[in-house]
Amino acid sequence: MPDSSERYGFVVVSNRLPVDRVIAEDGSASWQHSPGGLVTALEPVMQANDGAWVGWAGQPDLEFEPFVDQGISIVPVPLSAEEVQRYYEGFSNDTLWPLYHDVIAAPTYHRVWWEAYVQVNQRFADRAAEITEEGGTIWVQDYQLQLVPKMLREIRPDVTIGFFNHIPFPPLGIFSQLPWRKQILEGLLGADVIGFQRADDASNFSRAVRHLLGHATTRPYIEVPVDDESAPVSRRGKKVRRVLAKHFPISIDAASYEELAARPDIQARAREIREGLGNPKTVMLGVDRLDYTKGIRHRMKAFGELLADGRLSVEDATLVQVASPSRERVETYKLLRDEIELTVGRVNGDYATMSHTAISYHHHGYPREEMVALYLAADIMLVTALRDGMNLVAKEYVAVRRDNDGVLVLSEFAGAADELKSAMLINPHDIGGMKNTIMRAIEMPKRDRTTRMRALRRRVLDNDVAKWSASFLQALENVRPGQQITPAP
Ligand code: G6P
């Protein structure tokens, strides 16, 4: 166990830790490694650089000592039940989340939530500052922690600071609603490099900085005025610090998905899944956190109408929808679940037969092996998000299709659409257009499917998550020479 005064050269800060607390039937608790994409990407970098991960363990009032998990030091930031409600469920997921996703749901603004957000961000910053060695690097992740870069710079000006926003950054007209918009921008500008998923997110951010703070920007840099006498002078004659704001599209650990897809037991499971569905001609698949940004209802509406129109029957096509439980105490998510489950019930009630279901709906999360089997079983992957930072499910589907088969139907409002141009791109608001695209996907000749999938696979396999983290860390090094992080071996 690392002692509490230990210091680290490379520190990642995110709302959630890369471990889950699991309680066994006998009531005993243990830690389980949670192998998300970010963890997989950063694990080798952390192992090579004596890294630590600062975050919340996902439950209120859980205090424990730092420990080492798979070569990464886990450093907890505890949250009280009230902080979970105000900072996490409230400000992060009922204010920022809907605001940053095109106000698909109405954001709620509460001053007490904001106060909790400031207080909790300060706690994350203090903890990270405490454990980072002189001249070290801290990489802050995502919208829950946008004030941390500035707070860190105030306590630890010696440290190199990166920030990556995993979700969209909204256009000025939407962002301006936020009563604390200036504080958020100033918080982010504490970083040396601010990474976004899409070029549009970076330019939305730069525009907000220009309009709301009046700083000069020469893409991709932002000039932040500073008091420091030794700082360089800008063209406007001011002492400035240059912040890089640029897109670094995140990816997946593509090789590990390919490996799973090559396993005979997983391939057998894929066949078993199809049989279990009554061997329909076409299996369509949706995989999402149960979130209103994902366009799950739009997809079900399109499918339901295709059945109603007689363009499809349940013998022709089944839609498998995995909707993993998410943020279940936030009201908008409760309402969404009811709506989705009502829709599933209606479509199945109207069209399912004794031997074929229309929508096979699963309100669970599944292990990665089962997800890969599902991807292999699916002829068509439906990603119909109304707004999404990236959407890694689209990339996972592509990575497992070693057979160069399968069709990806992808919303143009997902960040992944900027890269995956050979997918069948759709506007999920256009139900008629989506229905026609689904039919074209179902009827697509094998040769066309292969051409498209080959191009998609090249893109995903050549740009994996290790490349993502290496290019972000390289940008940090360029902006602030002296930052020395060994890239993943
Ligand atoms: C998105 C966010 C992440 C978040 C994840 C799951 O991908 O960008 O920061 O961790 O959703 O949401 P949760 O609220 O359960 O952490």
Image (cartoon, rainbow, N blue to C red):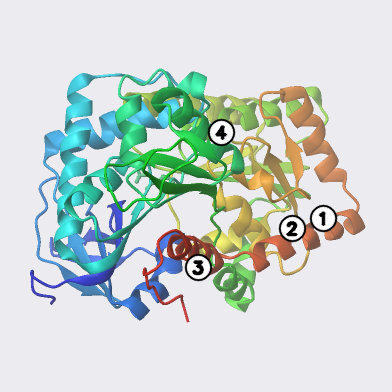
Q: Secondary structure at mark 4?
A: loop
In primary-sequence order, the first of circles 3 and 2 is 2
Residue corresponding to mark 2: 456
Q: Secondary structure at mark 3?
A: helix
- Residue drawn at (29%, 30%), measured in percent from left and top? 183
Q: Residues within 10 Å of mark 2 (few under 14, many from 20)?
A: many
Residue corresponding to mark 3: 470
Dot 3 and dot 1 residues touching (CB under 8 Å): no
Q: Residues within 10 Å of mark 3 (few under 14, many from 20)?
A: some
Dot 2 and dot 1 residues touching (CB under 8 Å): yes
Q: Secondary structure at mark 2?
A: helix
Q: Secondary structure at mark 1?
A: helix
- Image coordinates of residue 177 in percent, x first then y, are 40, 17
Q: Residues within 10 Å of mark 4 (few under 14, many from 20)?
A: many
Residue corresponding to mark 1: 452
Marking on residue 250: none
Residue 445 visible? The answer is yes
Please name the amino acid that badge 4 sits on.
Arg
Dot 4 and dot 2 residues touching (CB under 8 Å): no
Please name the amino acid that badge 3 sits on.
Ala
Q: Alpha carbon of mark 3 to alpha carbon of mark 1: how far?
A: 28 Å
Please name the amino acid that badge 1 sits on.
Arg
In primary-sequence order, the first of circles 4 and 2 is 4
